[in-house]
Image (tube, grey):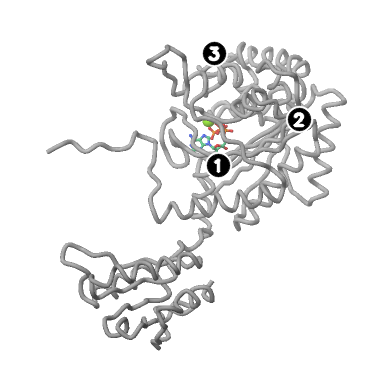
């Protein structure tokens, strides 16, 4: 027997009915973005490797060990499956001069790729939805983006998602803090794990983000970046806080919140839940005013966030908030295969009216018994069966049988529709 192939580890098929949950989430996101005036940007899934090395920084988890990189077999170019999309958004904004007439509010969604250990809420191909406000210095748009996310949780019916915020200040302020931090950590060198020792001089700030339980006391007592911020950075942060307060949005200041990419400055934030085990961050972002320049463009301030769609769906499931999977409005029962050529155009009329109809399809033994067709009709979840019986069709009619009422029960009674008025019935159904 030929060996069966399976999907790559950590990369999932999304099959019906679960794909309907995805579509519902995507529609909800699109609707919300439209109301906030964010427009869709679509960039390629493959980008030059240099984009991420330069954008995210060499000493980051992603660039050090999580990227799917390869050489283009034909021209030797170094390419990478995008592990995130902020760098791609900035590249595209520069390439198309999107900011020529002012700031732009953009969103994207799609697959990202990271070579991580697959586990609940952590996959190698996963999906992000991201919102990016380019060309705005904030903190009003910083607040807007956070409020937008809160509106999303509310619209999805999610609860228990907590907001953490912090300010990373400006590069010069981080440098002063960095020195204090290195001195402090060097004084406790015996308590550092291997990762921390390696990062001590390359990226000490990231050590604060460690998940190693043995290092929590150490990092909790470390010098705080917040104490090194200048007046302007502090004012930006205070204004963000007051804007959140004005919306009645609760948050916790987490002085250790640093984020995984090097491009962030000033505001950073995460939305976290305790209901997803250790993969509790559902949405994360911040300001990245230096990235445009780092990418070789004219400096432009920017802020954005990305959410993990798998984690949001997992949380929706956990909280019983997933919607019912859509069912067809009607199922067409067709006893005689010879009538299919007449039935199909009628169903097409209904679909033109926006009605969703499934026709019973022939098997190897023809259409099958009425009983088996009704079983299928019932299993489809359709509200109505349209029965194209021999007798009825000869009289130019079709039988309409309600399968379930608004509360799922069938109210029994069957009626007759004229075939030439089925479309009218369909238009009233919607
Ligand atoms: P984590 O600390 O969980 O690794 P991260 O800081 O690497 O997250 P970001 O790069 O900020 O994550 O991505 C934004 C969001 O995308 C995360 O908050 C999370 O919800 C989701 N995400 C990140 N990596 C994965 C993954 N491998 N599988 C599923 N979702 C992910
Ligand atoms: Mg990560």
- Mark 1 sits near ligand 1, with its Cβ under 8 Å away: yes
Mark sitting earlier along the chain (3/2): 2
In depth, the one of 430 and 265 nearer the eye is: 430
From mark 3 to mark 2, how far is it between C-alphas? 36 Å
In depth, the one of 289 and 184 nearer the eye is: 289
SS category of the residue bearing label 2: loop
In depth, the one of 276 and 127 nearer the eye is: 127
From mark 1 to mark 2, how far is it between C-alphas? 30 Å
Callout 3 crowding tier (Cα within 10 Å): few <14, some 14–19, many ≥20: some
Q: Would residue 324 be found to the left or right of residue 230 on screen?
A: left
Classify 192 as above or below 274: above
From mark 3 to mark 1, how far is it between C-alphas? 26 Å
Classify 82 as above or below 250: above
Classify 325 as above or below 298: below
Q: At which x and y percent is residue 223?
A: 72, 22
Find residue 198 and name its label: 3
Q: Which residue is mark 2?
A: 135
Callout 2 crowding tier (Cα within 10 Å): few <14, some 14–19, many ≥20: many
**Placement of the C terminus among the 4 image quadrants:** bottom right
User: Who's the residue at 42% across and 18% down the image?
Assistant: 70
SS category of the residue bearing label 3: helix
The reply to whether callout 3 and callout 2 are in contact (CB within 8 Å) is no
In depth, the one of 186 and 174 nearer the eye is: 174
Q: Quadrant of residue 271?
A: top right
Q: Which residue is mark 1?
A: 280
Find residue 350 and name its label: none
SS category of the residue bearing label 1: loop
Q: Please state which of the two labelled residues, at mark 1 or mark 2, is closer to the viewer.
A: 2
Mark sitting earlier along the chain (3/1): 3
């Amino acid at each position: 027997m030929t060996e069966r192939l399976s999907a790559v580890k950590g990369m999932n098929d999304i099959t019906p009915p679960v794909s309907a949950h995805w579509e519902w989430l995507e529609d909800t996101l699109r609707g919300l973005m439209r109301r906030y005036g964010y427009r869709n940007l679509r960039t390629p899934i493959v980008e030059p490797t240099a984009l991420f090395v330069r954008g995210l920084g060499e000493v980051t988890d992603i660039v050090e060990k999580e990227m799917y990189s390869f050489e283009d077999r034909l021209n030797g170019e170094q390419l990478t499956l995008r592990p995130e999309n902020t760098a791609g958004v900035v590249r595209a904004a520069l390439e198309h001069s999107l900011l020529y007439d002012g700031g732009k509010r953009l969103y994207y969604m799609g697959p990202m790729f990271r070579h991580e250990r697959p586990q609940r809420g952590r996959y190698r191909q996963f999906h992000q939805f991201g919102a990016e406000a380019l060309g705005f210095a904030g903190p009003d748009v910083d607040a807007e983006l956070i409020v937008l996310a809160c509106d999303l949780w509310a619209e999805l019916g999610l609860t228990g998602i907590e907001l953490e915020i912090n300010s990373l200040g400006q590069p010069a302020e981080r440098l002063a803090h960095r020195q204090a931090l290195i001195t402090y950590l060097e004084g406790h060198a015996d308590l550092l794990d291997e990762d921390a020792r390696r990062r001590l001089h390359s990226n000490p700030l990231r050590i604060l983000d460690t998940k190693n339980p043995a290092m929590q006391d150490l990092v909790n007592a470390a010098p705080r970046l917040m104490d090194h911020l200048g007046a302007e950075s502090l004012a930006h942060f205070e204004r963000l806080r007051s804007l959140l307060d004005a919306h009645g949005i609760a948050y916790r200041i987490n002085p250790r919140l640093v984020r995984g990419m090097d491009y962030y400055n000033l505001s950073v934030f995460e939305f976290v839940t305790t209901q997803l085990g250790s993969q509790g961050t559902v949405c994360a972002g911040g300001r990245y005013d230096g990235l445009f320049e780092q990418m070789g463009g004219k400096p432009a301030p920017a802020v954005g966030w990305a959410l993990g769609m798998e984690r949001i769906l997992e949380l929706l499931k956990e909280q019983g908030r997933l919607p019912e999977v859509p069912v067809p409005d009607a199922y067409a029962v067709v006893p005689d295969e010879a009538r299919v050529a007449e039935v199909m155009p009628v169903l097409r009329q209904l679909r033109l009216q926006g009605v969703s109809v499934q026709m019973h399809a022939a098997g190897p033994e023809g259409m099958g018994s009425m009983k088996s067709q009704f079983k299928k009709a019932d299993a489809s979840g359709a509200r109505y069966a349209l029965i194209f019986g021999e007798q009825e069709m000869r009289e130019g009619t079709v039988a309409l049988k309600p399968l379930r009422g608004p509360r799922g029960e069938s109210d029994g009674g069957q009626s007759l529709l004229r075939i030439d008025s089925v479309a009218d019935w369909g238009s009233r159904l919607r």
